[in-house]
Amino acid sequence: MSDSAVLDAPKVKGAPDEVYSQPIEALNPAQSALFKADAMWPYFDRLRAEDPVHWSPASDFEPHWDITRWDDIMAVDTNHEVFSSEGGISLGPSEAMIEKLVASGAQMTGGPFGGPSGGPTMFIAMDPPKHDEQRKTVSPAVAPHNLMIMEPLIRERAGQILDGLPIGEPFDWVDKVSMELTAMTLATLFGMPQEDRRKLTRWSDTVMSRPGDGIVETWEEKRAEMAAYATYFLNLWAQRKENPVDGDMVSMLAHGEATKDMNQFEYLGNIILLTIGGNDTTRNTISGSVYALNKYPEQYDKLRANPDLIPSMVSETIRWQTPLAHMKRTATRDFDLGGKTIKKGDAVVMWYVSGNRDDTVIDRPNDYIIDRERPRQHLSFGFGIHRCVGNRLAELQLKIIWEEILKRFHEIRVLDEPQRVPSTFVKGYQSMQVIIPRRL
């Protein structure tokens, strides 16, 4: 088993003494560098304790309220009438950052999850009734009956991936396993050829990255990637209009009563949503499970001794990892929360990553405990009308991959701290070097 000391968080900006020496008004957890270094935890610890409904003025991101406690997050997430999704569901850039980006060649046509008009829009960034109609159109693809049909295929692919891994030599788990399984599943849901599956990985990463983050180097390159993404799925839409495929989400959108006449921006917006929702979140939780079991080797021992704990371990991983760090809403009217008055038009950020570590609700929340009494008690899928439509598919893929892992390997050993994504939205991994010493 890996020496857990190897997996200690790096000592970087965000150390507790530095965080607690600042005035509370100066704290702003919305910093990509903090998430890349896994150094945001003291920010959230202090905000939950001292200022759980906290105002952050404009920085790289728009000014916003930071909501960090479980109960306050639930109050926002379950009140879609006061807290609307139509202003976008992820933090947008500040005006100063927009000017800087435009000067560097960026085209500000709305973020990947809604925002200024002219860019892609999607049902998660809509309010009822339109949200409900569009969500209802694609939800059969991830309904229990369809998942039961998909399970043998997911299991077969998981086995093939694991059987092809090198033994006794380092490799990148993120690339070889997490990305592969989720891309295969998502390509099936879209009705795409499997040989195109890693395009989905590339496009998902491109949507969520800025030039220089390690995915694309220039805005021109990003625009070219996004144009190829749009062209591919507009062509697929045209094909499915003529020849629908049963169980294919593109066919569902092309022929659904509420979606068949949507414009190309709405269609592409929903494709982006389904790509990222079906890709980033599951793959980062698969990687997170390996990382967590190495960081807590006694839990790995517990899992090996009792594979029946896999479903509980899956839920605990989803909580502990929290693959999407936040969701944003926009206040439709003045509203009092936690002794503060949120004004109409204010951006309100629910930090799921913080709520999942709230010790007033979850016992020992910073620890990874795979046999918790209530492992499904977490915020990672959201609540209310926007609860993750594919949550059961995500759980199924994690369950299957670990059932197949335990049949084959005694240990997957993490060799060093993973490279994390520089994002305040997707909380994930760019790469993670591991070694499998032997097969069973």
Image (tube, rainbow, N blue to C red):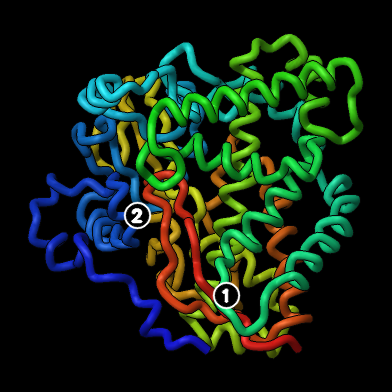
- Is 260 placed left or right of 422 in the picture? right
Amino acid of disc 1: Arg
Density class for disc 2 (Cα within 10 Å; few <14, some 14-19, many ≥20) is many
Looking at the image, residue 144 sits to the left or right of residue 6; the answer is right
The alpha-carbon separation of the residues under discs 1 and 2 comes to 26 Å
In the picture, the disc for residue 68 is none
The image quadrant that residue 159 belongs to is bottom right
**Which residue is more in the foreground, 228 or 379?**
228
Q: Is residue 129 visible in the rendered structure shown here?
A: no
**Depth check, front residue: 212 or 111:** 212
Residue density around tag 1, few if under 14, some if 14–19, many if 20 or more, within 10 Å: some
Q: Secondary structure at mark 2?
A: helix
Which residue occupies 56% across, 64% down?
287
Q: Is 249 positioned to the left or the right of 274 in the image?
A: right
**Residue at image point 83% right, 63% down:** 155
Residue that label 2 marks: 35
Residue 372 is marked as 1
Quarter of the image where one finds residue 210 = top left
Across and down, in percent, residue 58 comes to 20, 32
Name the residue at 57% across, 48% down: 280
Earlier residue among tags 1 and 2: 2
In the rendered structure, which amino acid carries the disc numbered 2?
Phe
Percent from the top left, x then y, of residue 238? 79, 16
Q: Position of residue 418 (x, y in %)?
A: 44, 66
Is 113 on the left-hand or right-hand side of 100? Answer: right
Q: Residue at x 29, y 61 (%)?
A: 39
